[in-house]
Amino acid sequence: MAVLVGKKAPHFSAQAVINGGEFVSSFSLDQFLGKKNVVLFFYPKDFTFICPTELHAFQEKLAEFETRHTAVVAVSTDSEQSHWAWLQTPKSHGGIQGVKYALVADGNRTISSAYDVLNGEFGVDDEGQLTASSEMVAYRGLFLIDKHGVVRHQIVNDFPLGRNVDEVLRLVDALTFSEEHGEVCPANWSAGKAGLKADHEGIADYLSKH
C-alpha cells in the first residue's frame, strides 16, 4: 500500500452528488485549498449494510467537523445516479436520506487507484486503462488532508470493519492543536489536554507527570 502521509493528496475531478441531491459535474478538493481541512473517506458500495451506518455517523457529526473548518467527502466506485438514488432512500429502508456532504462517483476507479485503496485483481493495459478480472471496489480508506492539500493521516480498514468517527474528530483536533501551538500530541491525547514540546526536555517533563 502506498503511504501518502506527508505528500500532496492525489488530485481528481469527478461527478458527485452534494446537499443530498444536487449533481456536480467536476467536483474536486481544490475548492478547499487554503480554507478547510478535508476528511476524505472511501467505502465499498451503495445499498449495503455497514456502509450506511458509517455515512449516517459522519452526518451526525457533520456540524462538529464544520466548526473545525473541516469538510467531509465520501467516495465509492458507484455511479452518481446510484448515489442520488441512495440519498433519496429513507434510513428505515437502508438508505442515507439526510446525508448532506459530497458523495463522489469513482466509476472508472481512478480515484480509488490513486489513493491505493482499490480491491480486486486488476492491471493496466497498453493504453493506460485499468483492466480487471474481478469486481473492483474500494476498501474503507480514510485520509485527513490539511488546508495545504497535504495528507496528514491515513488508515485503511478491510470490508467488515467499520470506522470510529469520534477518533477522526480527535485527529482533526490533534492536527489543529499541533499547527496552532507548535507542540506534539502524545498517546491518547484529546482536546483540552496538554501537548508536549518536541524536545528531550519537553518529553521528560511530560513523562514525569504521567
Image: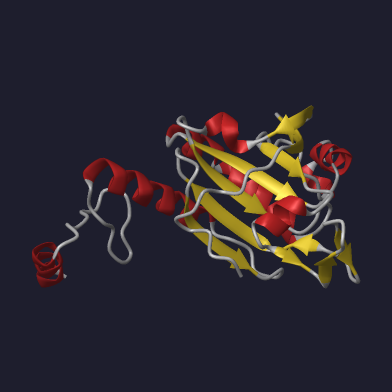
Q: Is residue 32 visible?
A: yes
Report x, y in % for residue 126. Answer: 87, 62
Please tell me which residue lies in front, 134 or 57. Answer: 134
Report x, y in % for residue 115. Answer: 64, 57
Please tell me which residue lies in front, 21 or 132. Answer: 132
Please tell me which residue lies in front, 76 or 14. Answer: 14
Residue drawn at x 31%, y 49% is 191
Residue drawn at x 80%, y 56% is 45
Q: Is residue 149 left or right of residue 142?
A: left
Report x, y in % for residue 68. Answer: 42, 37
Q: Is residue 37 left or right of residue 52?
A: left
Q: Is residue 129 left or right of residue 146?
A: right
Residue drawn at x 19%, y 60% is 198
- Indicate the quadrant where residue 130 lies: bottom right
Q: In the rendered view, tell whether residue 183 sits above or below residue 81.
A: below
The N terminus lies in quadrant:
bottom right
- Indicate the quadrant where residue 160 lies: bottom right
The C terminus lies in quadrant:
bottom left
Q: In the rendered view, tell whether residue 15 sits above or below residue 183.
A: above
